[in-house]
Image (tube, helix red, strand yellow):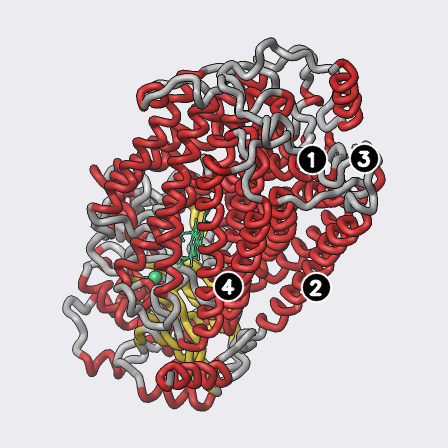
């Protein structure tokens, strides 16, 4: 390689986006609404997810604005409760859970394994419709009075004590759950059945591994959530009494059921993000991921362990002290594979040849923030410190570090990384790097003070708080406005680049994945003929050899 | 402009006076928890520093400019084993350390003074054994183990005292416990930390820690008439519990004397420790726990007694050491007049007497009423 940067853009004068590609194949709204092309469905998801993210983000802004002062003066407590509940519900169920799998996963998994589409293309479209129905139901319940149960729908608050749209919202999440299960099933079947010749399990890109692990969680965990929500709806509608102690039910049962899904759900959210990081770090360091097998297996380990730690959300709820002991230990164990990943990514850089384009910057951001998020998770896994820190802003900070610092950074990293493949055009590099920096700074500014607030004891979900907490809250709100800009920028310049971005070419990053060996944007069928895979993932020597062959022939 | 600088100034003044970075340590457990907390902070800082150092130094050393061609490395079992085992070891230390603290916080000592706390939308009601009631505040003495027995009347609530580093959920339908020993007089925050509906953030109060002398004064000033056990005694009569539980040989219900803290043999052959939670459940769901030798005829009192009432009944039953009180109660078919309740300090009489007899089982009254 002779050039200084990886980016070797095709000569702008002659470069063209291929006339035939999945975007241009057919025109008209109907061709999109009835498509079964996984790339078009991924595009539909991308647009709808961005829409819901914007709503959730606006609500986040309102939350922070309210918390600028100790009193609940911007909105009444009632309104505040609805705002943070809708924020949580939208962000978790309509953004975080589907984000990477439904957009990037949908777009990439078939291509990465050398298939022409997902195994069940129509089911894939159905998933999107279910997602949209759920989204519309959530919006409907938001407009017609909202929900104030928090995203956790805790009983008996949700079943007996609030007058808001619990049933509509609960059913919306139920529907969204099916969308998630279908996506997971589709991925599992596809990865098992549709790999190209030569694409063995241990040649799979790590992105595929991590989505595979997340899919297992979706398929096994989501039905439990669905059952739980149905029980909530039945209890609310008909007073069946499963959760009502005066009828012999048990509200703790709800906690068990809810967290049996919602803990693994955290990994549904983060695992696909980890897959993105593996791809990006490898590409920009030009090295195979350090300890590929360990990283692959740690995804599966996380998925398996994730089902045995739910009770750590209930340490102070009066469950048996001894069961707490067991779950604390298991939670410590699940932290280990995450630590393994962080170190493996770091060592992927060792003796690499590194460049720092935007996706890489977001990945660095991910590694730093996820490390903090993960380490503070240990504070909560250790039962002693959990007593003091749980249900405070420490929790809020912890999960935003993992979800927003981790998952969202990974999502943005991935969107930038695969943007040229998806649209055929580059995003503008300089301003994107700036946006990554702004996001990182804004993020820390917003959420780091919340660790301190939590240590001081400020409870979460408070519309008003004692005056001594104000300084840290002001910091947090100031940070949120910076963070807001950080999120707004990519939406703007990515949209701009659709028309004005430079033509990307097939493989602007000189990456090894199969997706980079086809045209950008891809054909509807992805491949003109199914490839035969004769090398491992991230085999940069293979890539160089191949490029030499091509240039000597040409 | 003037206005803004004024606001800024106010803010700065506030900052200087109000800004805290760490909560006060006002209980015996707090320094222990903080030791673990700072150990974790230290480990986290070291861990984070290692990660950041690796990322930064590799980024500099192996940037494309300095290191144009990557060297392909498969991995290293030794290194990977290292970063599996070291974090695992550290996590296990935190697990053991944390568990020791956890067990301490949730295992009240036998001689703790019991205060009942009922959570409801949106207030905390505390009931001292001597009958003192408080709402959204809790007065306690230093140097004395205090056990809280918590329950909620409606939704989940959570009783949190950051300065003590303790927190416990109040759950509908079951008693939970937490204990602490306050060390420093002062007023501290009491928060409800489990989201409980509209006025969740208003469900706050003060923990007022007093020296033992001041506490005695406070108790004397806020005596509300009857102790919990006395209130329970009245309820026992007015709900006609004594029709069956009269302690006679041929009575339809088992004698309740000395029942608290004993192991009962149930009709289904199992044994059951009669603690507060059991007593509560036996009142509300009697058919679930039929004592051996008795017919399942007790009606449920579900929905007829408030949680406060149940607490009083439980305290009354706890205070019963002999059948003497029951027999007394038997003759009382109407509520005792105010004055009479005061004249017979049941807490002292029975609760105090019981203390000696039932091998250190925590009772209520003693500490309060004796003063
Ligand atoms: C500018 C960015 C954001 C700010 C300032 C922000 C702020 C907040 C705050 C203050 C809360 C706590 C509400 C409370 O407990 O009182 C909260 C809750 C939450 N946030 Fe965010 N947030 C932001 C972005 C996000 C994003 C991007 C996500 C997900 C992708 C997210 C997911 C959540 C969730 C799941 C909750 C829990 C809601 C609940 O307690 O029920 N947030 N957020
Ligand atoms: Cu509450």
Left or right of B245? Residue A39 is right
Dots 1 and 4 on the same chain = yes
Mark 2 nearby-residue class (10 Å; few <14, some 14–19, many ≥20): few
Dots 2 and 1 on the same chain = no
* Residue A279 occupies quadrant: top right
Judging depth in this view, the residue of A113 and B269 nearest the camera is A113
Q: In this figure, which residue is indicated by the disc labeled 1?
A: A283
Q: Position of residue B232 (x, y in %)?
A: 27, 67
Judging depth in this view, the residue of A172 and B353 nearest the camera is A172
Mark 4 nearby-residue class (10 Å; few <14, some 14–19, many ≥20): many
Quadrant for the C terminus of chain A in the image = top right
Q: Position of residue A43 (x, y in %)?
A: 44, 29
Label of residue B42 in the image: 2
Q: How many marks?
A: 4
Q: Residue at x 66, y 27 (%)?
A: A205
Mark 1 nearby-residue class (10 Å; few <14, some 14–19, many ≥20): many
Alpha carbon distance from label 1 to label 3: 17 Å
SS label for mark 4: helix
Mark 3 nearby-residue class (10 Å; few <14, some 14–19, many ≥20): some
Q: Position of residue B60 (x, y in %)?
A: 78, 52
Alpha carbon distance from label 2 to label 1: 34 Å
Q: In this figure, which residue is indicated by the disc labeled 3?
A: B75
Alpha carbon distance from label 2 to label 4: 19 Å
Judging depth in this view, the residue of A309 and B44 nearest the camera is B44
Q: Residue at x 43, y 40 (%)?
A: A95
Q: Are marks 1 and 3 in contact (CB under 8 Å)?
A: no
Q: Chain of mark 4?
A: A
SS label for mark 2: helix
Q: Nearer the viewer, mark 1 or mark 4?
A: 1
Q: Residue at x 53, y 27 (%)?
A: A216
Alpha carbon distance from label 3 to label 4: 38 Å
* Residue B169 occupies quadrant: bottom left
């Amino acid at each position: 390689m002779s050039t200084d940067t990886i980016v070797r853009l095709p000569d702008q004068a002659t470069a063209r986006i291929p006339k035939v590609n999945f975007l241009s194949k057919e025109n008209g709204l109907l061709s999109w609404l009835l498509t079964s092309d996984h790339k078009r469905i991924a595009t539909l998801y991308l647009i709808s997810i961005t829409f819901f993210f914007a709503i959730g983000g606006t609500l986040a802004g309102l939350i922070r604005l309210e918390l600028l002062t100790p009193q609940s003066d911007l909105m009444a407590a009632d309104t505040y409760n609805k705002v943070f509940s809708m924020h949580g519900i939208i962000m978790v169920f309509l953004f975080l859970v589907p984000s990477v799998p439904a957009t990037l996963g949908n777009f990439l998994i078939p291509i990465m394994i050398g298939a022409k589409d997902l195994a069940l293309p129509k089911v894939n479209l159905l998933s999107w419709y279910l997602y949209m129905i759920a989204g519309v139901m959530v919006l409907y319940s938001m407009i017609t009075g909202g929900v104030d149960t928090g995203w956790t729908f805790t009983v008996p608050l949700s079943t007996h004590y609030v007058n808001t749209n619990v049933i509509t919202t609960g059913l919306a999440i139920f529907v969204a759950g099916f969308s998630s299960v279908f996506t997971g099933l589709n991925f599992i079947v596809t990865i098992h059945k549709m790999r190209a010749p030569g694409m063995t399990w241990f040649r799979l890109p790590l992105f595929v591994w991590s989505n595979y692990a997340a899919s297992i969680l979706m398929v096994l965990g989501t039905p439990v959530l669905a059952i739980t929500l149905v029980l909530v709806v039945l209890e609310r509608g008909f007073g069946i009494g499963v959760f009502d102690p005066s009828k012999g039910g048990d509200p703790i049962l709800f906690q068990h059921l809810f967290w049996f899904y919602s803990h693994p759900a955290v990994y549904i959210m983060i695992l696909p993000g980890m897959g993105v990081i593996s791809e990006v770090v490898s590409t920009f360091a030009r090295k195979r991921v350090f300890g590929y097998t360990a990283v692959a297996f740690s995804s599966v380990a996380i998925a398996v362990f994730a089902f045995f730690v739910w009770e750590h959300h209930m340490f102070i709820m009066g469950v048996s002290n001894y069961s707490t002991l067991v779950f604390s230990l298991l939670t410590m164990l699940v932290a280990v594979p995450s630590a393994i990943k962080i170190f493996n990514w770091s060592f992927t850089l060792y003796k690499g040849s590194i460049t720092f384009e935007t996706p890489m910057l977001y990945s660095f951001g991910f590694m730093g923030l996820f490390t903090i998020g993960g380490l503070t998770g240990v504070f909560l896994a250790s039962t002693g410190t959990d007593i003091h820190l749980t249900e405070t802003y420490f929790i809020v900070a912890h999960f935003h570090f993992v979800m927003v610092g981790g998952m969202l950074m990974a999502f943005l990293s991935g969107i930038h990384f695969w943007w040229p493949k998806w649209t055929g055009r580059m995003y503008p590099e300089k301003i994107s790097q700036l946006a990554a920096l702004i996001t990182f700074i804004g993020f820390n500014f917003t959420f780091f003070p919340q660790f301190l607030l939590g240590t001081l004891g400020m409870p979460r979900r408070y519309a008003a708080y004692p005056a001594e907490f104000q300084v840290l809250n002001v910091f947090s709100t100031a940070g949120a406005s910076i963070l807001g800009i950080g999120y707004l920028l990519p939406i703007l310049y990515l949209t701009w680049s659709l028309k004005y971005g430079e033509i990307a070419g097939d493989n602007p990053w000189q990456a090894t994945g199969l997706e980079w060996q086809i045209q950008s944007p891809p054909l509807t069928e992805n491949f003109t003929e199914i490839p035969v895979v004769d090398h491992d993932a991230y085999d940069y020597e293979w890539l160089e050899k191949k490029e030499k062959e091509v240039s000597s022939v040409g | 402009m003037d206005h803004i600088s004024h606001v800024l100034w106010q803010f700065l003044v506030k900052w200087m006076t109000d800004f805290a970075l760490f909560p006060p340590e006002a209980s015996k457990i707090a320094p222990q928890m903080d030791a673990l907390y700072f150990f974790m902070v230290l480990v986290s800082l070291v861990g984070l520093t290692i990660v950041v150092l690796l990322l930064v130094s590799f980024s500099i050393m192996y940037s494309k400019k300095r290191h144009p061609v990557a060297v392909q490395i498969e991995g290293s079992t030794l290194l990977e084993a290292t970063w599996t085992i070291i974090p695992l070891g550290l996590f296990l230390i935190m697990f053991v350390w944390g568990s020791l603290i956890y067990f301490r916080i949730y295992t009240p000592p036998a001689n703790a003074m019991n205060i009942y706390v009922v959570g409801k939308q949106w207030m905390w009601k505390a009931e001292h054994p001597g009958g003192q009631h408080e709402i959204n505040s809790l007065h306690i003495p230093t140097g004395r183990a205090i056990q809280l027995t918590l329950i909620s009347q409606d939704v989940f609530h959570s009783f949190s005292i950051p300065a003590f580093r303790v927190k416990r959920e109040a759950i509908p339908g079951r008693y939970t416990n937490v204990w602490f020993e306050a060390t420093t007089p002062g007023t501290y925050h009491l928060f409800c930390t489990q989201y409980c509906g509209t006025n969740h953030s208003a469900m706050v109060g003060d923990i007022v820690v007093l020296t033992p002398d001041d506490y005695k004064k406070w108790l004397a000033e806020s005596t509300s008439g009857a102790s919990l056990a006395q209130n329970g005694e009245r309820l026992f009569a007015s709900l006609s519990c004594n029709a069956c539980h009269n302690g006679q040989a041929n009575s339809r219900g088992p004698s309740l004397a000395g029942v608290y803290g004993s192991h009962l043999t149930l009709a289904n052959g199992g044994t059951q420790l009669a603690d507060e939670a059991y007593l509560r459940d036996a009142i509300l769901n009697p058919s679930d726990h039929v004592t051996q030798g008795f017919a399942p005829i007790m009606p449920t009192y579900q929905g007829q007694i408030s949680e406060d009432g149940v607490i009083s009944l439980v305290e009354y039953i706890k205070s019963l050491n002999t059948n003497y009180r029951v027999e007394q109660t038997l003759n009382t078919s109407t509520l005792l007049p105010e004055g009479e309740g005061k004249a017979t300090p049941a807490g002292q009489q029975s609760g105090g007497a019981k203390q000696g007899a039932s091998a250190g089982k925590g009772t209520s009254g003693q500490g309060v009423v004796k003063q």
